[in-house]
Amino acid sequence: MHEDQLLPAEPGVRAIARELYRHAKDLPLISPHGHVDPAILADDRPFPDPARLIVVPDHYVTRMLGSQGIPPARLGVPALDGTEVETDGRAIWRLLAEHWHLLRGTPSRLWTERVLAEVFEVPVALGPRTADEVYDAVAARLADPGFRPRALFERFNLEVLATTESPLSDLEAHAKLAADGWGGPGGRVITTFRPDDLVDLDWPGWAERVARLGAGTYAEFLTRLRERRAAFIAAGATSSDHGHASAATLALGPAEASALFDRALRGRAEAGDAERFRAHMLVEFARMSVEDGLVMQLHPGAVRNHNAALHARHGRDVGGDIPGPTEYVRALKPLLDAFGTDPRFRLVLYTLDETTFTRELAPIAGGYPAVFLGAPWWFLDSPEGLRRFREAVTETAGFYNTAGFVDDTRAFCSIPVRHDVARRVDAGFLARLVAEHRLPLDEAAETIADLAYHLPRRVFQRTVHNGVSA
């Protein structure tokens, strides 16, 4: 990759950006939100073949190829309906290489190219004619002990990696990591409390999952959730994460919340109950965060399983979700009225609707001490999306009401390149401020180090002492 990739094209500004980038490029990585399977690191087994590592689990890639008529099953994506799935890794890789041009200009191509060049040190570019050569080069690296998960973790300079689990998880992988000195409070691999499957009445199997939690009443439900949060904290968790359809919050009284919960358990939920329950539980989870110190993350706005045929054939989380418009100002007011100025509470807000950055999210973060803006994610974590984020929010929220970069990925080997892309984009943005004489160079250098490392460390690594978070 070119040393100036993603830095400004204008030579004078580029020179400043190079200098600023040097202040950030070698800082440790903080990954406070992502979806890497912790068993990968707990077991530390060699990765599978290149296709199953790089193609099959990457719904950014399979979604793009699917949009051009290439069925996910041909790319190795497991099917639920008996569809024949390609199992030959080399055949999957050749299919990707044959259609590599479809990814031109996308962040998926940028990330994958950099993973191949920088992580696996492949000396040739991927394309139809080089598919086997690249495949063999990656496969050879994967056979080397230096490319096992824990060895790569060290090489990536990862200080901490947060995974994401349901409250129903037994956290077995995290227990194994803790026994090996990798997990637990202050560990290098920690968990994140993600209770969506227990608060979304529209998610099939909700009542069965509540039964597995051991809750027959609303009061028991809250008690069991607090107990699971405590177990997650014991496994190292510093945050919770909530992926709701909207940002709506609602403070129901105990009797009304209990009645709604009971209706749902009996299969008699009424129209609007699911949204009301999700909204109410966000307020309850905020209350729990005040008690136990977990930082609360809210990721709203995805219309889940929009592609019904894809969902029916391959299940959830395979590229069938679409962003929807999201409102925050009125939606969050009940929660912010209760906890927005509480020094014990911290809320990190994300969006898939970037029209809200300037109009809603930056003013909210600039007006409530408990609120921080999370990085652009999912459909927005491209170089252009990251630039637009800085341009949209800095004038109102500044830099220090943001929470640093999150890679939000299942693709373990892409973590360092995603962070590097964010650091390069921030270097370019700050360089323009310096070139326009809006920020001194020394302050810009301090700021890029804060954005890359110090801010996420400060926002997400909270501690609790005698019930008071700090």
Image (spheres, rainbow, N blue to C red):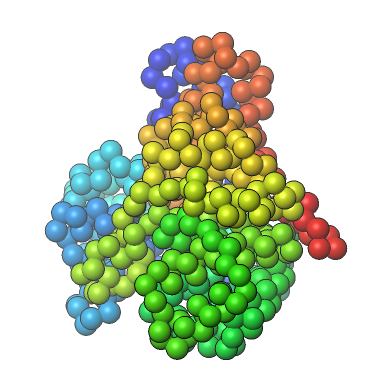
Q: Is residue 327 left or right of residue 307?
A: right
Instruction: Evaluate whether residue 268 shows in this view.
Output: yes
| Residue at x-position 31% and y-position 55% | 322
| Residue at x-position 50% and y-position 70% | 277
Q: Nearer the viewer, residue 21 or 463?
A: 463
Callout count: 0
The N terminus: image quadrant: top left
User: x, y percentage for residue 257?
Assistant: 56, 74
Asked where in the image residue 215 lies, by quadrant, the reply is: bottom right
Q: Is residue 126 left or right of residue 351?
A: left
Asked where in the image residue 76 lies, by quadrant, the reply is: bottom left
User: x, y percentage for residue 371?
Assistant: 61, 45
| Residue at x-position 40% and y-position 69% | 272
User: x, y percentage for residue 104?
Assistant: 25, 41
Task: Name the residue at the right extreme.
Answer: 466
Task: Name the residue at the left extreme.
Answer: 69
Q: Is residue 105 left or right of residue 38?
A: left
| Residue at x-position 63% and y-position 51% | 337
User: x, y percentage for residue 387?
Assistant: 43, 32
Look at the picture and state if 281 lies above or below 470: below
Q: Nearer the viewer, residue 131 or 204?
A: 204
Look at the picture and state if 203 lies above or below 445: below
Asked where in the image residue 225 lies, by quadrant, the reply is: bottom right
Q: Nearer the viewer, residue 196 or 359?
A: 359
Q: Is residue 210 left or right of residue 337?
A: left
Instruction: Evaluate whether residue 172 shows in this view.
Output: no
Look at the picture and state if 277 lies above or below 384: below
